[in-house]
Structures are given as structure tokens and as C-alpha cells.
């Protein structure tokens, strides 16, 4: 079963295949191909960009921790 999560601005999509997360650029000219982010994913959230801040992606993981990524799928912080 594949679940899809879209950012509010429509520029990114996360697909969960089982509990593996893949990031897609859904703009007209994608900057990258599908990118594997993490496994053990239980929750997907996108940050609010209405305030002009860059998009961030938060993945909740099955061990209770979370992983944070920028809009291009690069890890942010301590993950």
C-alpha cells in the first residue's frame, strides 16, 4: 500500500511505500529524481511556508524519534 502526502505549496510529495519514505519534486521542472529519505516512517509533516520560511519535511519514525529534511531531501540537524 502506497500513501502520498503533498506539501501545501504543491512543490513536494512524499510517498510511503510500506514504511519507506521517498521524496518527489512535483514542480514543472523537477530538480531531482525520487529520493529515498528513511525507513520506519509512521508520520509525514510539511512545515508552513506562508511566513516565507523555506519548506522543511518532518518524518516521524517508529522508534519515537523524528527526522528533519529540507525541500531537497537533505538532512537538517542531528539525523
Image: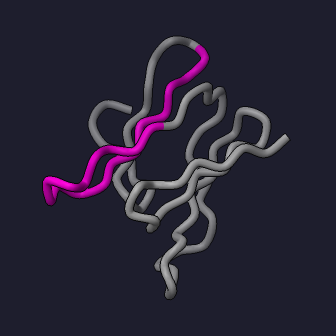
Is 46 left, or right, of 25 in this rendering? Answer: left
Please, which colouring scheme is shown?
one colour
Give the residue displayed 55% in from the left and 23% down from the top.
61
Q: Tell me the quadrant of the picture where the C terminus can be found.
A: top left
Q: Residue furthest right?
A: 1
Residue 47 is a magenta residue: yes
Of 31 and 44, nearer the camera is 44
Magenta segment, which residues? 45-62
Instruction: Please provide percent x and percent y for residue 3.
Output: 72, 44
Depth check: 9 or 44 in front? Answer: 9
Residue 30, given in percent of the width and then of the height, sits at 51, 80
Report which quarter residue 1 is drawn in: top right
Question: Which residue does the image show at 41% across and 55% down from the upper left?
Answer: 8
Q: Using the image as rendered, state which of residue 69 and residue 52 is in the foreground.
A: 52
The image shows residue 45 at horizontal and vertical percentages of 45, 38
The number of numbered discs placed on residues in the rendered structure image is 0
- The quadrant in which residue 9 appears is bottom left
When the figure is inspected, residue 33 is found, relative to residue 79, above or below; the finding is below
Q: Residue at x 51, y 86 (%)?
A: 28
Residue sitting farthest toward the bottom: 29
- Furthest residue in direction top, as rendered: 64
In the picture, measured across the screen, residue 65 lies left or right of residue 51, that is right
Magenta stretch holds residue 38? no
* Percent x, y of residue 65: 45, 17
Question: What residue lies at 25% left-to-right and 54% top-to-bottom?
Answer: 49
Amino acid at each position: 500500500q502506497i500513501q502520498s502526502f503533498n506539501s501545501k505549496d504543491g512543490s513536494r510529495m512524499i510517498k510511503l511505500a510500506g514504511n519507506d519514505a521517498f521524496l518527489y519534486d512535483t514542480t514543472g521542472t523537477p530538480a531531482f529524481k525520487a529520493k529515498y529519505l528513511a525507513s520506519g516512517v509512521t508520520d509525514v509533516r510539511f512545515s508552513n511556508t506562508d511566513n516565507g520560511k523555506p519548506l522543511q519535511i518532518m518524518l516521524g519514525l517508529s522508534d519515537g524519534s523524528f527526522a528533519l529534511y529540507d525541500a531537497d531531501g537533505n538532512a537538517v540537524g542531528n539525523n
